[in-house]
């Protein structure tokens, strides 16, 4: 018997991430991801996921210096990104940037997976910045780079800190659809760039990363709290899927959503947050559906003056680390990923 959507199928092993279970928590290599977000930089969490341990002070200084040396962009890549249409889809821009870099700097024995992982972490926000006519200083942290690339207002420390935390919460999530796509691609012994392009294409859909943009449209469709209850109930009667709710693994809470709620609670109050909280209350009462990570990131990024069509790109800037770490893990113990299908077509026809 096949299992639709591979639900509840264990499709491999990983030492990178543990989630769900009784406590419904999320751990990166044994560390609680929400607590990492309180205390560490995105770079430190990238180090943990890619190299296997929390960096010491010396290690994180050396790593940060190493990342600064990876910020140069090949002239032809920059020229192409600059020339892409203003109304292009941000995910197409990122996928194209990765693909182009793969042409100018193909993977080989010296220029290997870990170097490419670090380079993509540093360059992806810069690709978006170039396309948007902005420039990111060489020594900007990843969270600063993302804010500069995406925010349409001045970037302050409060925004950078909130962005740093959201990137950490997005960094890794076991065998989610885009990571699984990256693993399938790399299991054929394909190159790192191809695996990341597969993942970007997979993340884009509204059932996965694309939900954060759609969640904002849902929240913004209400002018005030009083109109929420009836509106949400009507959508549920119409059997609409409300983006930012539900999860394949978490059933009682998505810990990332709780963390994002507390980040928003610490920022200046907005009506949008109040409306979002009311939507969440009604979804729980009516459907027992939890908000997922994409619900409150939508509120946060809107408050940071980021255009909704860039929300899913920010997911990429975080998840690039999870994807890369999974590709390296897959390669270390590889076997082609090739499941079977249950045949439901006609019997052989003569
Ligand atoms: N709104 C309304 N009903 C829902 C929702 C929702 N967001 N999510 C699930 N349901 C209902 C669904 O209609 C079904 O009801 P019934 O049994 O009466 O047909 C039941 O709950 C089970 O849903 P499912 O779609 O079979 O569950 P799944 O495990 O296949 O899908 C999901 C998980 C996340 C794709 C789904 O909950 C969904 O489509 N959510 C909206 C999109 C979204 O927010 N995606 C972001 C996911 S978390 C971050 C990420 O990975 O990107």
Image (spheres, helix red, strand yellow):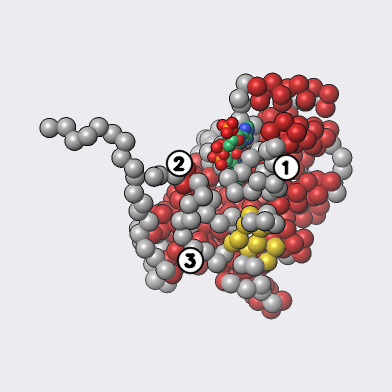
In terms of depth relative to the viewer, which is nearer, 224 or 129? 224
Please tell me whether mark 3 or mark 2 is closer to you in this view.
Answer: 2
* Labels 3 and 1: the sequence-earlier one: 1
Q: Is residue 263 left or right of residue 192?
A: right
Does the numbered disc 1 mark a residue whose Cβ is under 8 Å from ligand 1? no
Q: Which quadrant contains ligand 1?
A: top right
Quarter of the image where the N terminus is located:
top left
Mark pair 3, 1: CA separation: 31 Å
Quarter of the image where the C terminus is located:
top left
The label shown at residue 4 is 2
The label shown at residue 329 is 3
Q: Quadrant of residue 304?
A: top right
Q: Secondary structure at mark 1?
A: helix
* Labels 3 and 2: the sequence-earlier one: 2
| Residue highlighted by disc 1 | 296
Q: Secondary structure at mark 3?
A: helix
Q: Secondary structure at mark 2?
A: helix
């Amino acid at each position: 018997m096949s299992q639709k959507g591979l639900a509840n199928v264990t499709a491999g092993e990983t030492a990178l991430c543990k989630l769900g279970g009784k406590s419904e928590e999320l751990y990166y290599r044994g560390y609680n991801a929400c607590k990492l977000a309180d205390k560490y930089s995105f770079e430190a969490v990238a180090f943990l996921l890619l190299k296997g341990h929390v960096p010491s002070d010396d290690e994180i200084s050396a790593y940060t210096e190493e990342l600064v040396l990876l910020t140069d962009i090949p002239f032809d890549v920059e020229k192409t990104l600059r020339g892409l249409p203003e109304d292009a889809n941000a995910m197409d821009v990122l996928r194209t940037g990765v693909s182009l870099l793969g042409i100018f700097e193909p993977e080989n024995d010296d220029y290997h997976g870990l170097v490419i992982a670090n380079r993509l972490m540093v360059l992806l926000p810069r690709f978006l910045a170039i396309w948007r006519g902005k420039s990111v200083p060489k020594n900007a942290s990843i969270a600063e780079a993302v804010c500069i690339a995406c925010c349409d207002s001045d970037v302050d420390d409060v925004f950078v800190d909130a962005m740093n935390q959201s990137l950490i919460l997005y960094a890794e999530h076991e065998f989610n659809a885009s990571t699984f796509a990256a693993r399938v691609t790399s299991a054929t012994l394909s190159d790192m760039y191809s695996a990341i392009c597969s993942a970007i294409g997979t993340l884009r859909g509204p059932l996965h990363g694309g939900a954060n943009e759609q969640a904002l449209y849902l929240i913004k469709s209400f002018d005030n709290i009083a109109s929420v209850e009836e509106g949400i109930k009507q959508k549920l009667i119409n059997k609409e899927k409300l983006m930012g709710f539900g999860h394949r693994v978490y059933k009682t809470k998505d810990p990332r959503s709780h963390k994002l709620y507390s980040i928003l609670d610490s920022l200046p109050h907005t009506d949008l947050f109040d409306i979002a909280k009311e939507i969440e209350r009604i979804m729980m009462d009516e459907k027992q559906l939890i908000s997922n990570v994409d619900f409150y990131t939508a509120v946060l990024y809107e408050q940071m003056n980021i255009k909704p069509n860039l929300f899913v790109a920010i997911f990429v800037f975080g998840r690039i680390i999870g994807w890369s770490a999974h590709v390296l893990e897959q390669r270390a113990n590889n076997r082609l990923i090739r499941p079977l299908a249950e045949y439901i077509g006609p019997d052989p026809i003569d």
